[in-house]
Image (cartoon, rainbow, N blue to C red):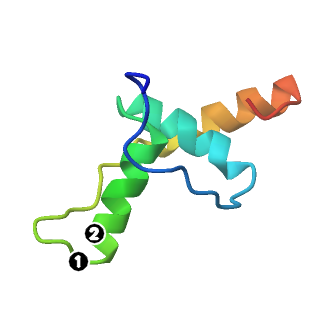
Amino acid sequence: MSPNQPKTPPRQIRIGDTWYDFDAAAKAMGTERAAVIRELIDWYIREPGAKLPSRPERAVVELARTQREAKGDRS
């Protein structure tokens, strides 16, 4: 077993181009998309002590979107 093998299997969902803006927003907050999604799920199903994750300023998302669109790609 490799040392970086995750404990849970990956799940697939369809989101669209906002996925890339979400990535920039998560990174701006010093985290990653998966961690934010887990926090949202815990809050949504009312896990004890779960709270909504902090959000970045809207300007972070707008800048990321503008840069992505200027490059003409989704990364």
* Quadrant position of the C terminus in the picture: top right
Q: What label does residue 43 carry, if any?
A: 2
Q: Please, what secondary structure does the residue beneath circle 2 have? A: helix
Name the residue: 36% across, 56% down: 38
- Say which mark, if any, is on residue 34: none
Q: Quadrant of the N terminus?
A: top left
Q: Nearer the viewer, residue 65 or 45?
A: 45
Q: Amino acid at mark 1?
A: Arg
Q: Residue furthest right?
A: 72
Q: Nearer the viewer, residue 51 or 10?
A: 10
Between the residue at mark 1 and the residue at mark 2, the CA separation in whole angstroms equals: 5 Å
Q: Which quadrant of the view contains residue 51?
A: bottom left
Q: Nearer the viewer, residue 55 or 4?
A: 4
Of all residues shown, which one is farthest toward the left? 49
Residue ranking furthest to the bottom:
45
Which residue does the image show at 37% across and 22% down from the upper left?
A: 3
Give the SS element for disc 1: loop
Foreground pick, 54 / 45: 45
Residue at figure coordinates x 56%, y 45% from the top left: 22
16 to 71, vertically: above or below: below
Q: Residues within 10 Å of mark 1 (few under 14, many from 20)?
A: few
Task: Say what amino acid the circle numbered 2 marks.
Answer: Trp
Bin the neighbour count of mark 2 within 10 Å (Cα to Cα): few under 14, some 14-19, many 20 and up: some
**Which residue position is annotated with label 1?**
46
Q: Are marks 1 and 2 in contact (CB under 8 Å)?
A: yes
Counting from the top left corner in percent of width and height, residue 35 is at 37, 45
Expressed as whole percent of the image width and height from the top left, the position of residue 19 reads: 64, 47
- Can you tell which quarter of the image residue 11 is in? bottom right
Left or right, 57 with reference to 73: left
Residue 6 appears at what percent x and percent y? 42, 38
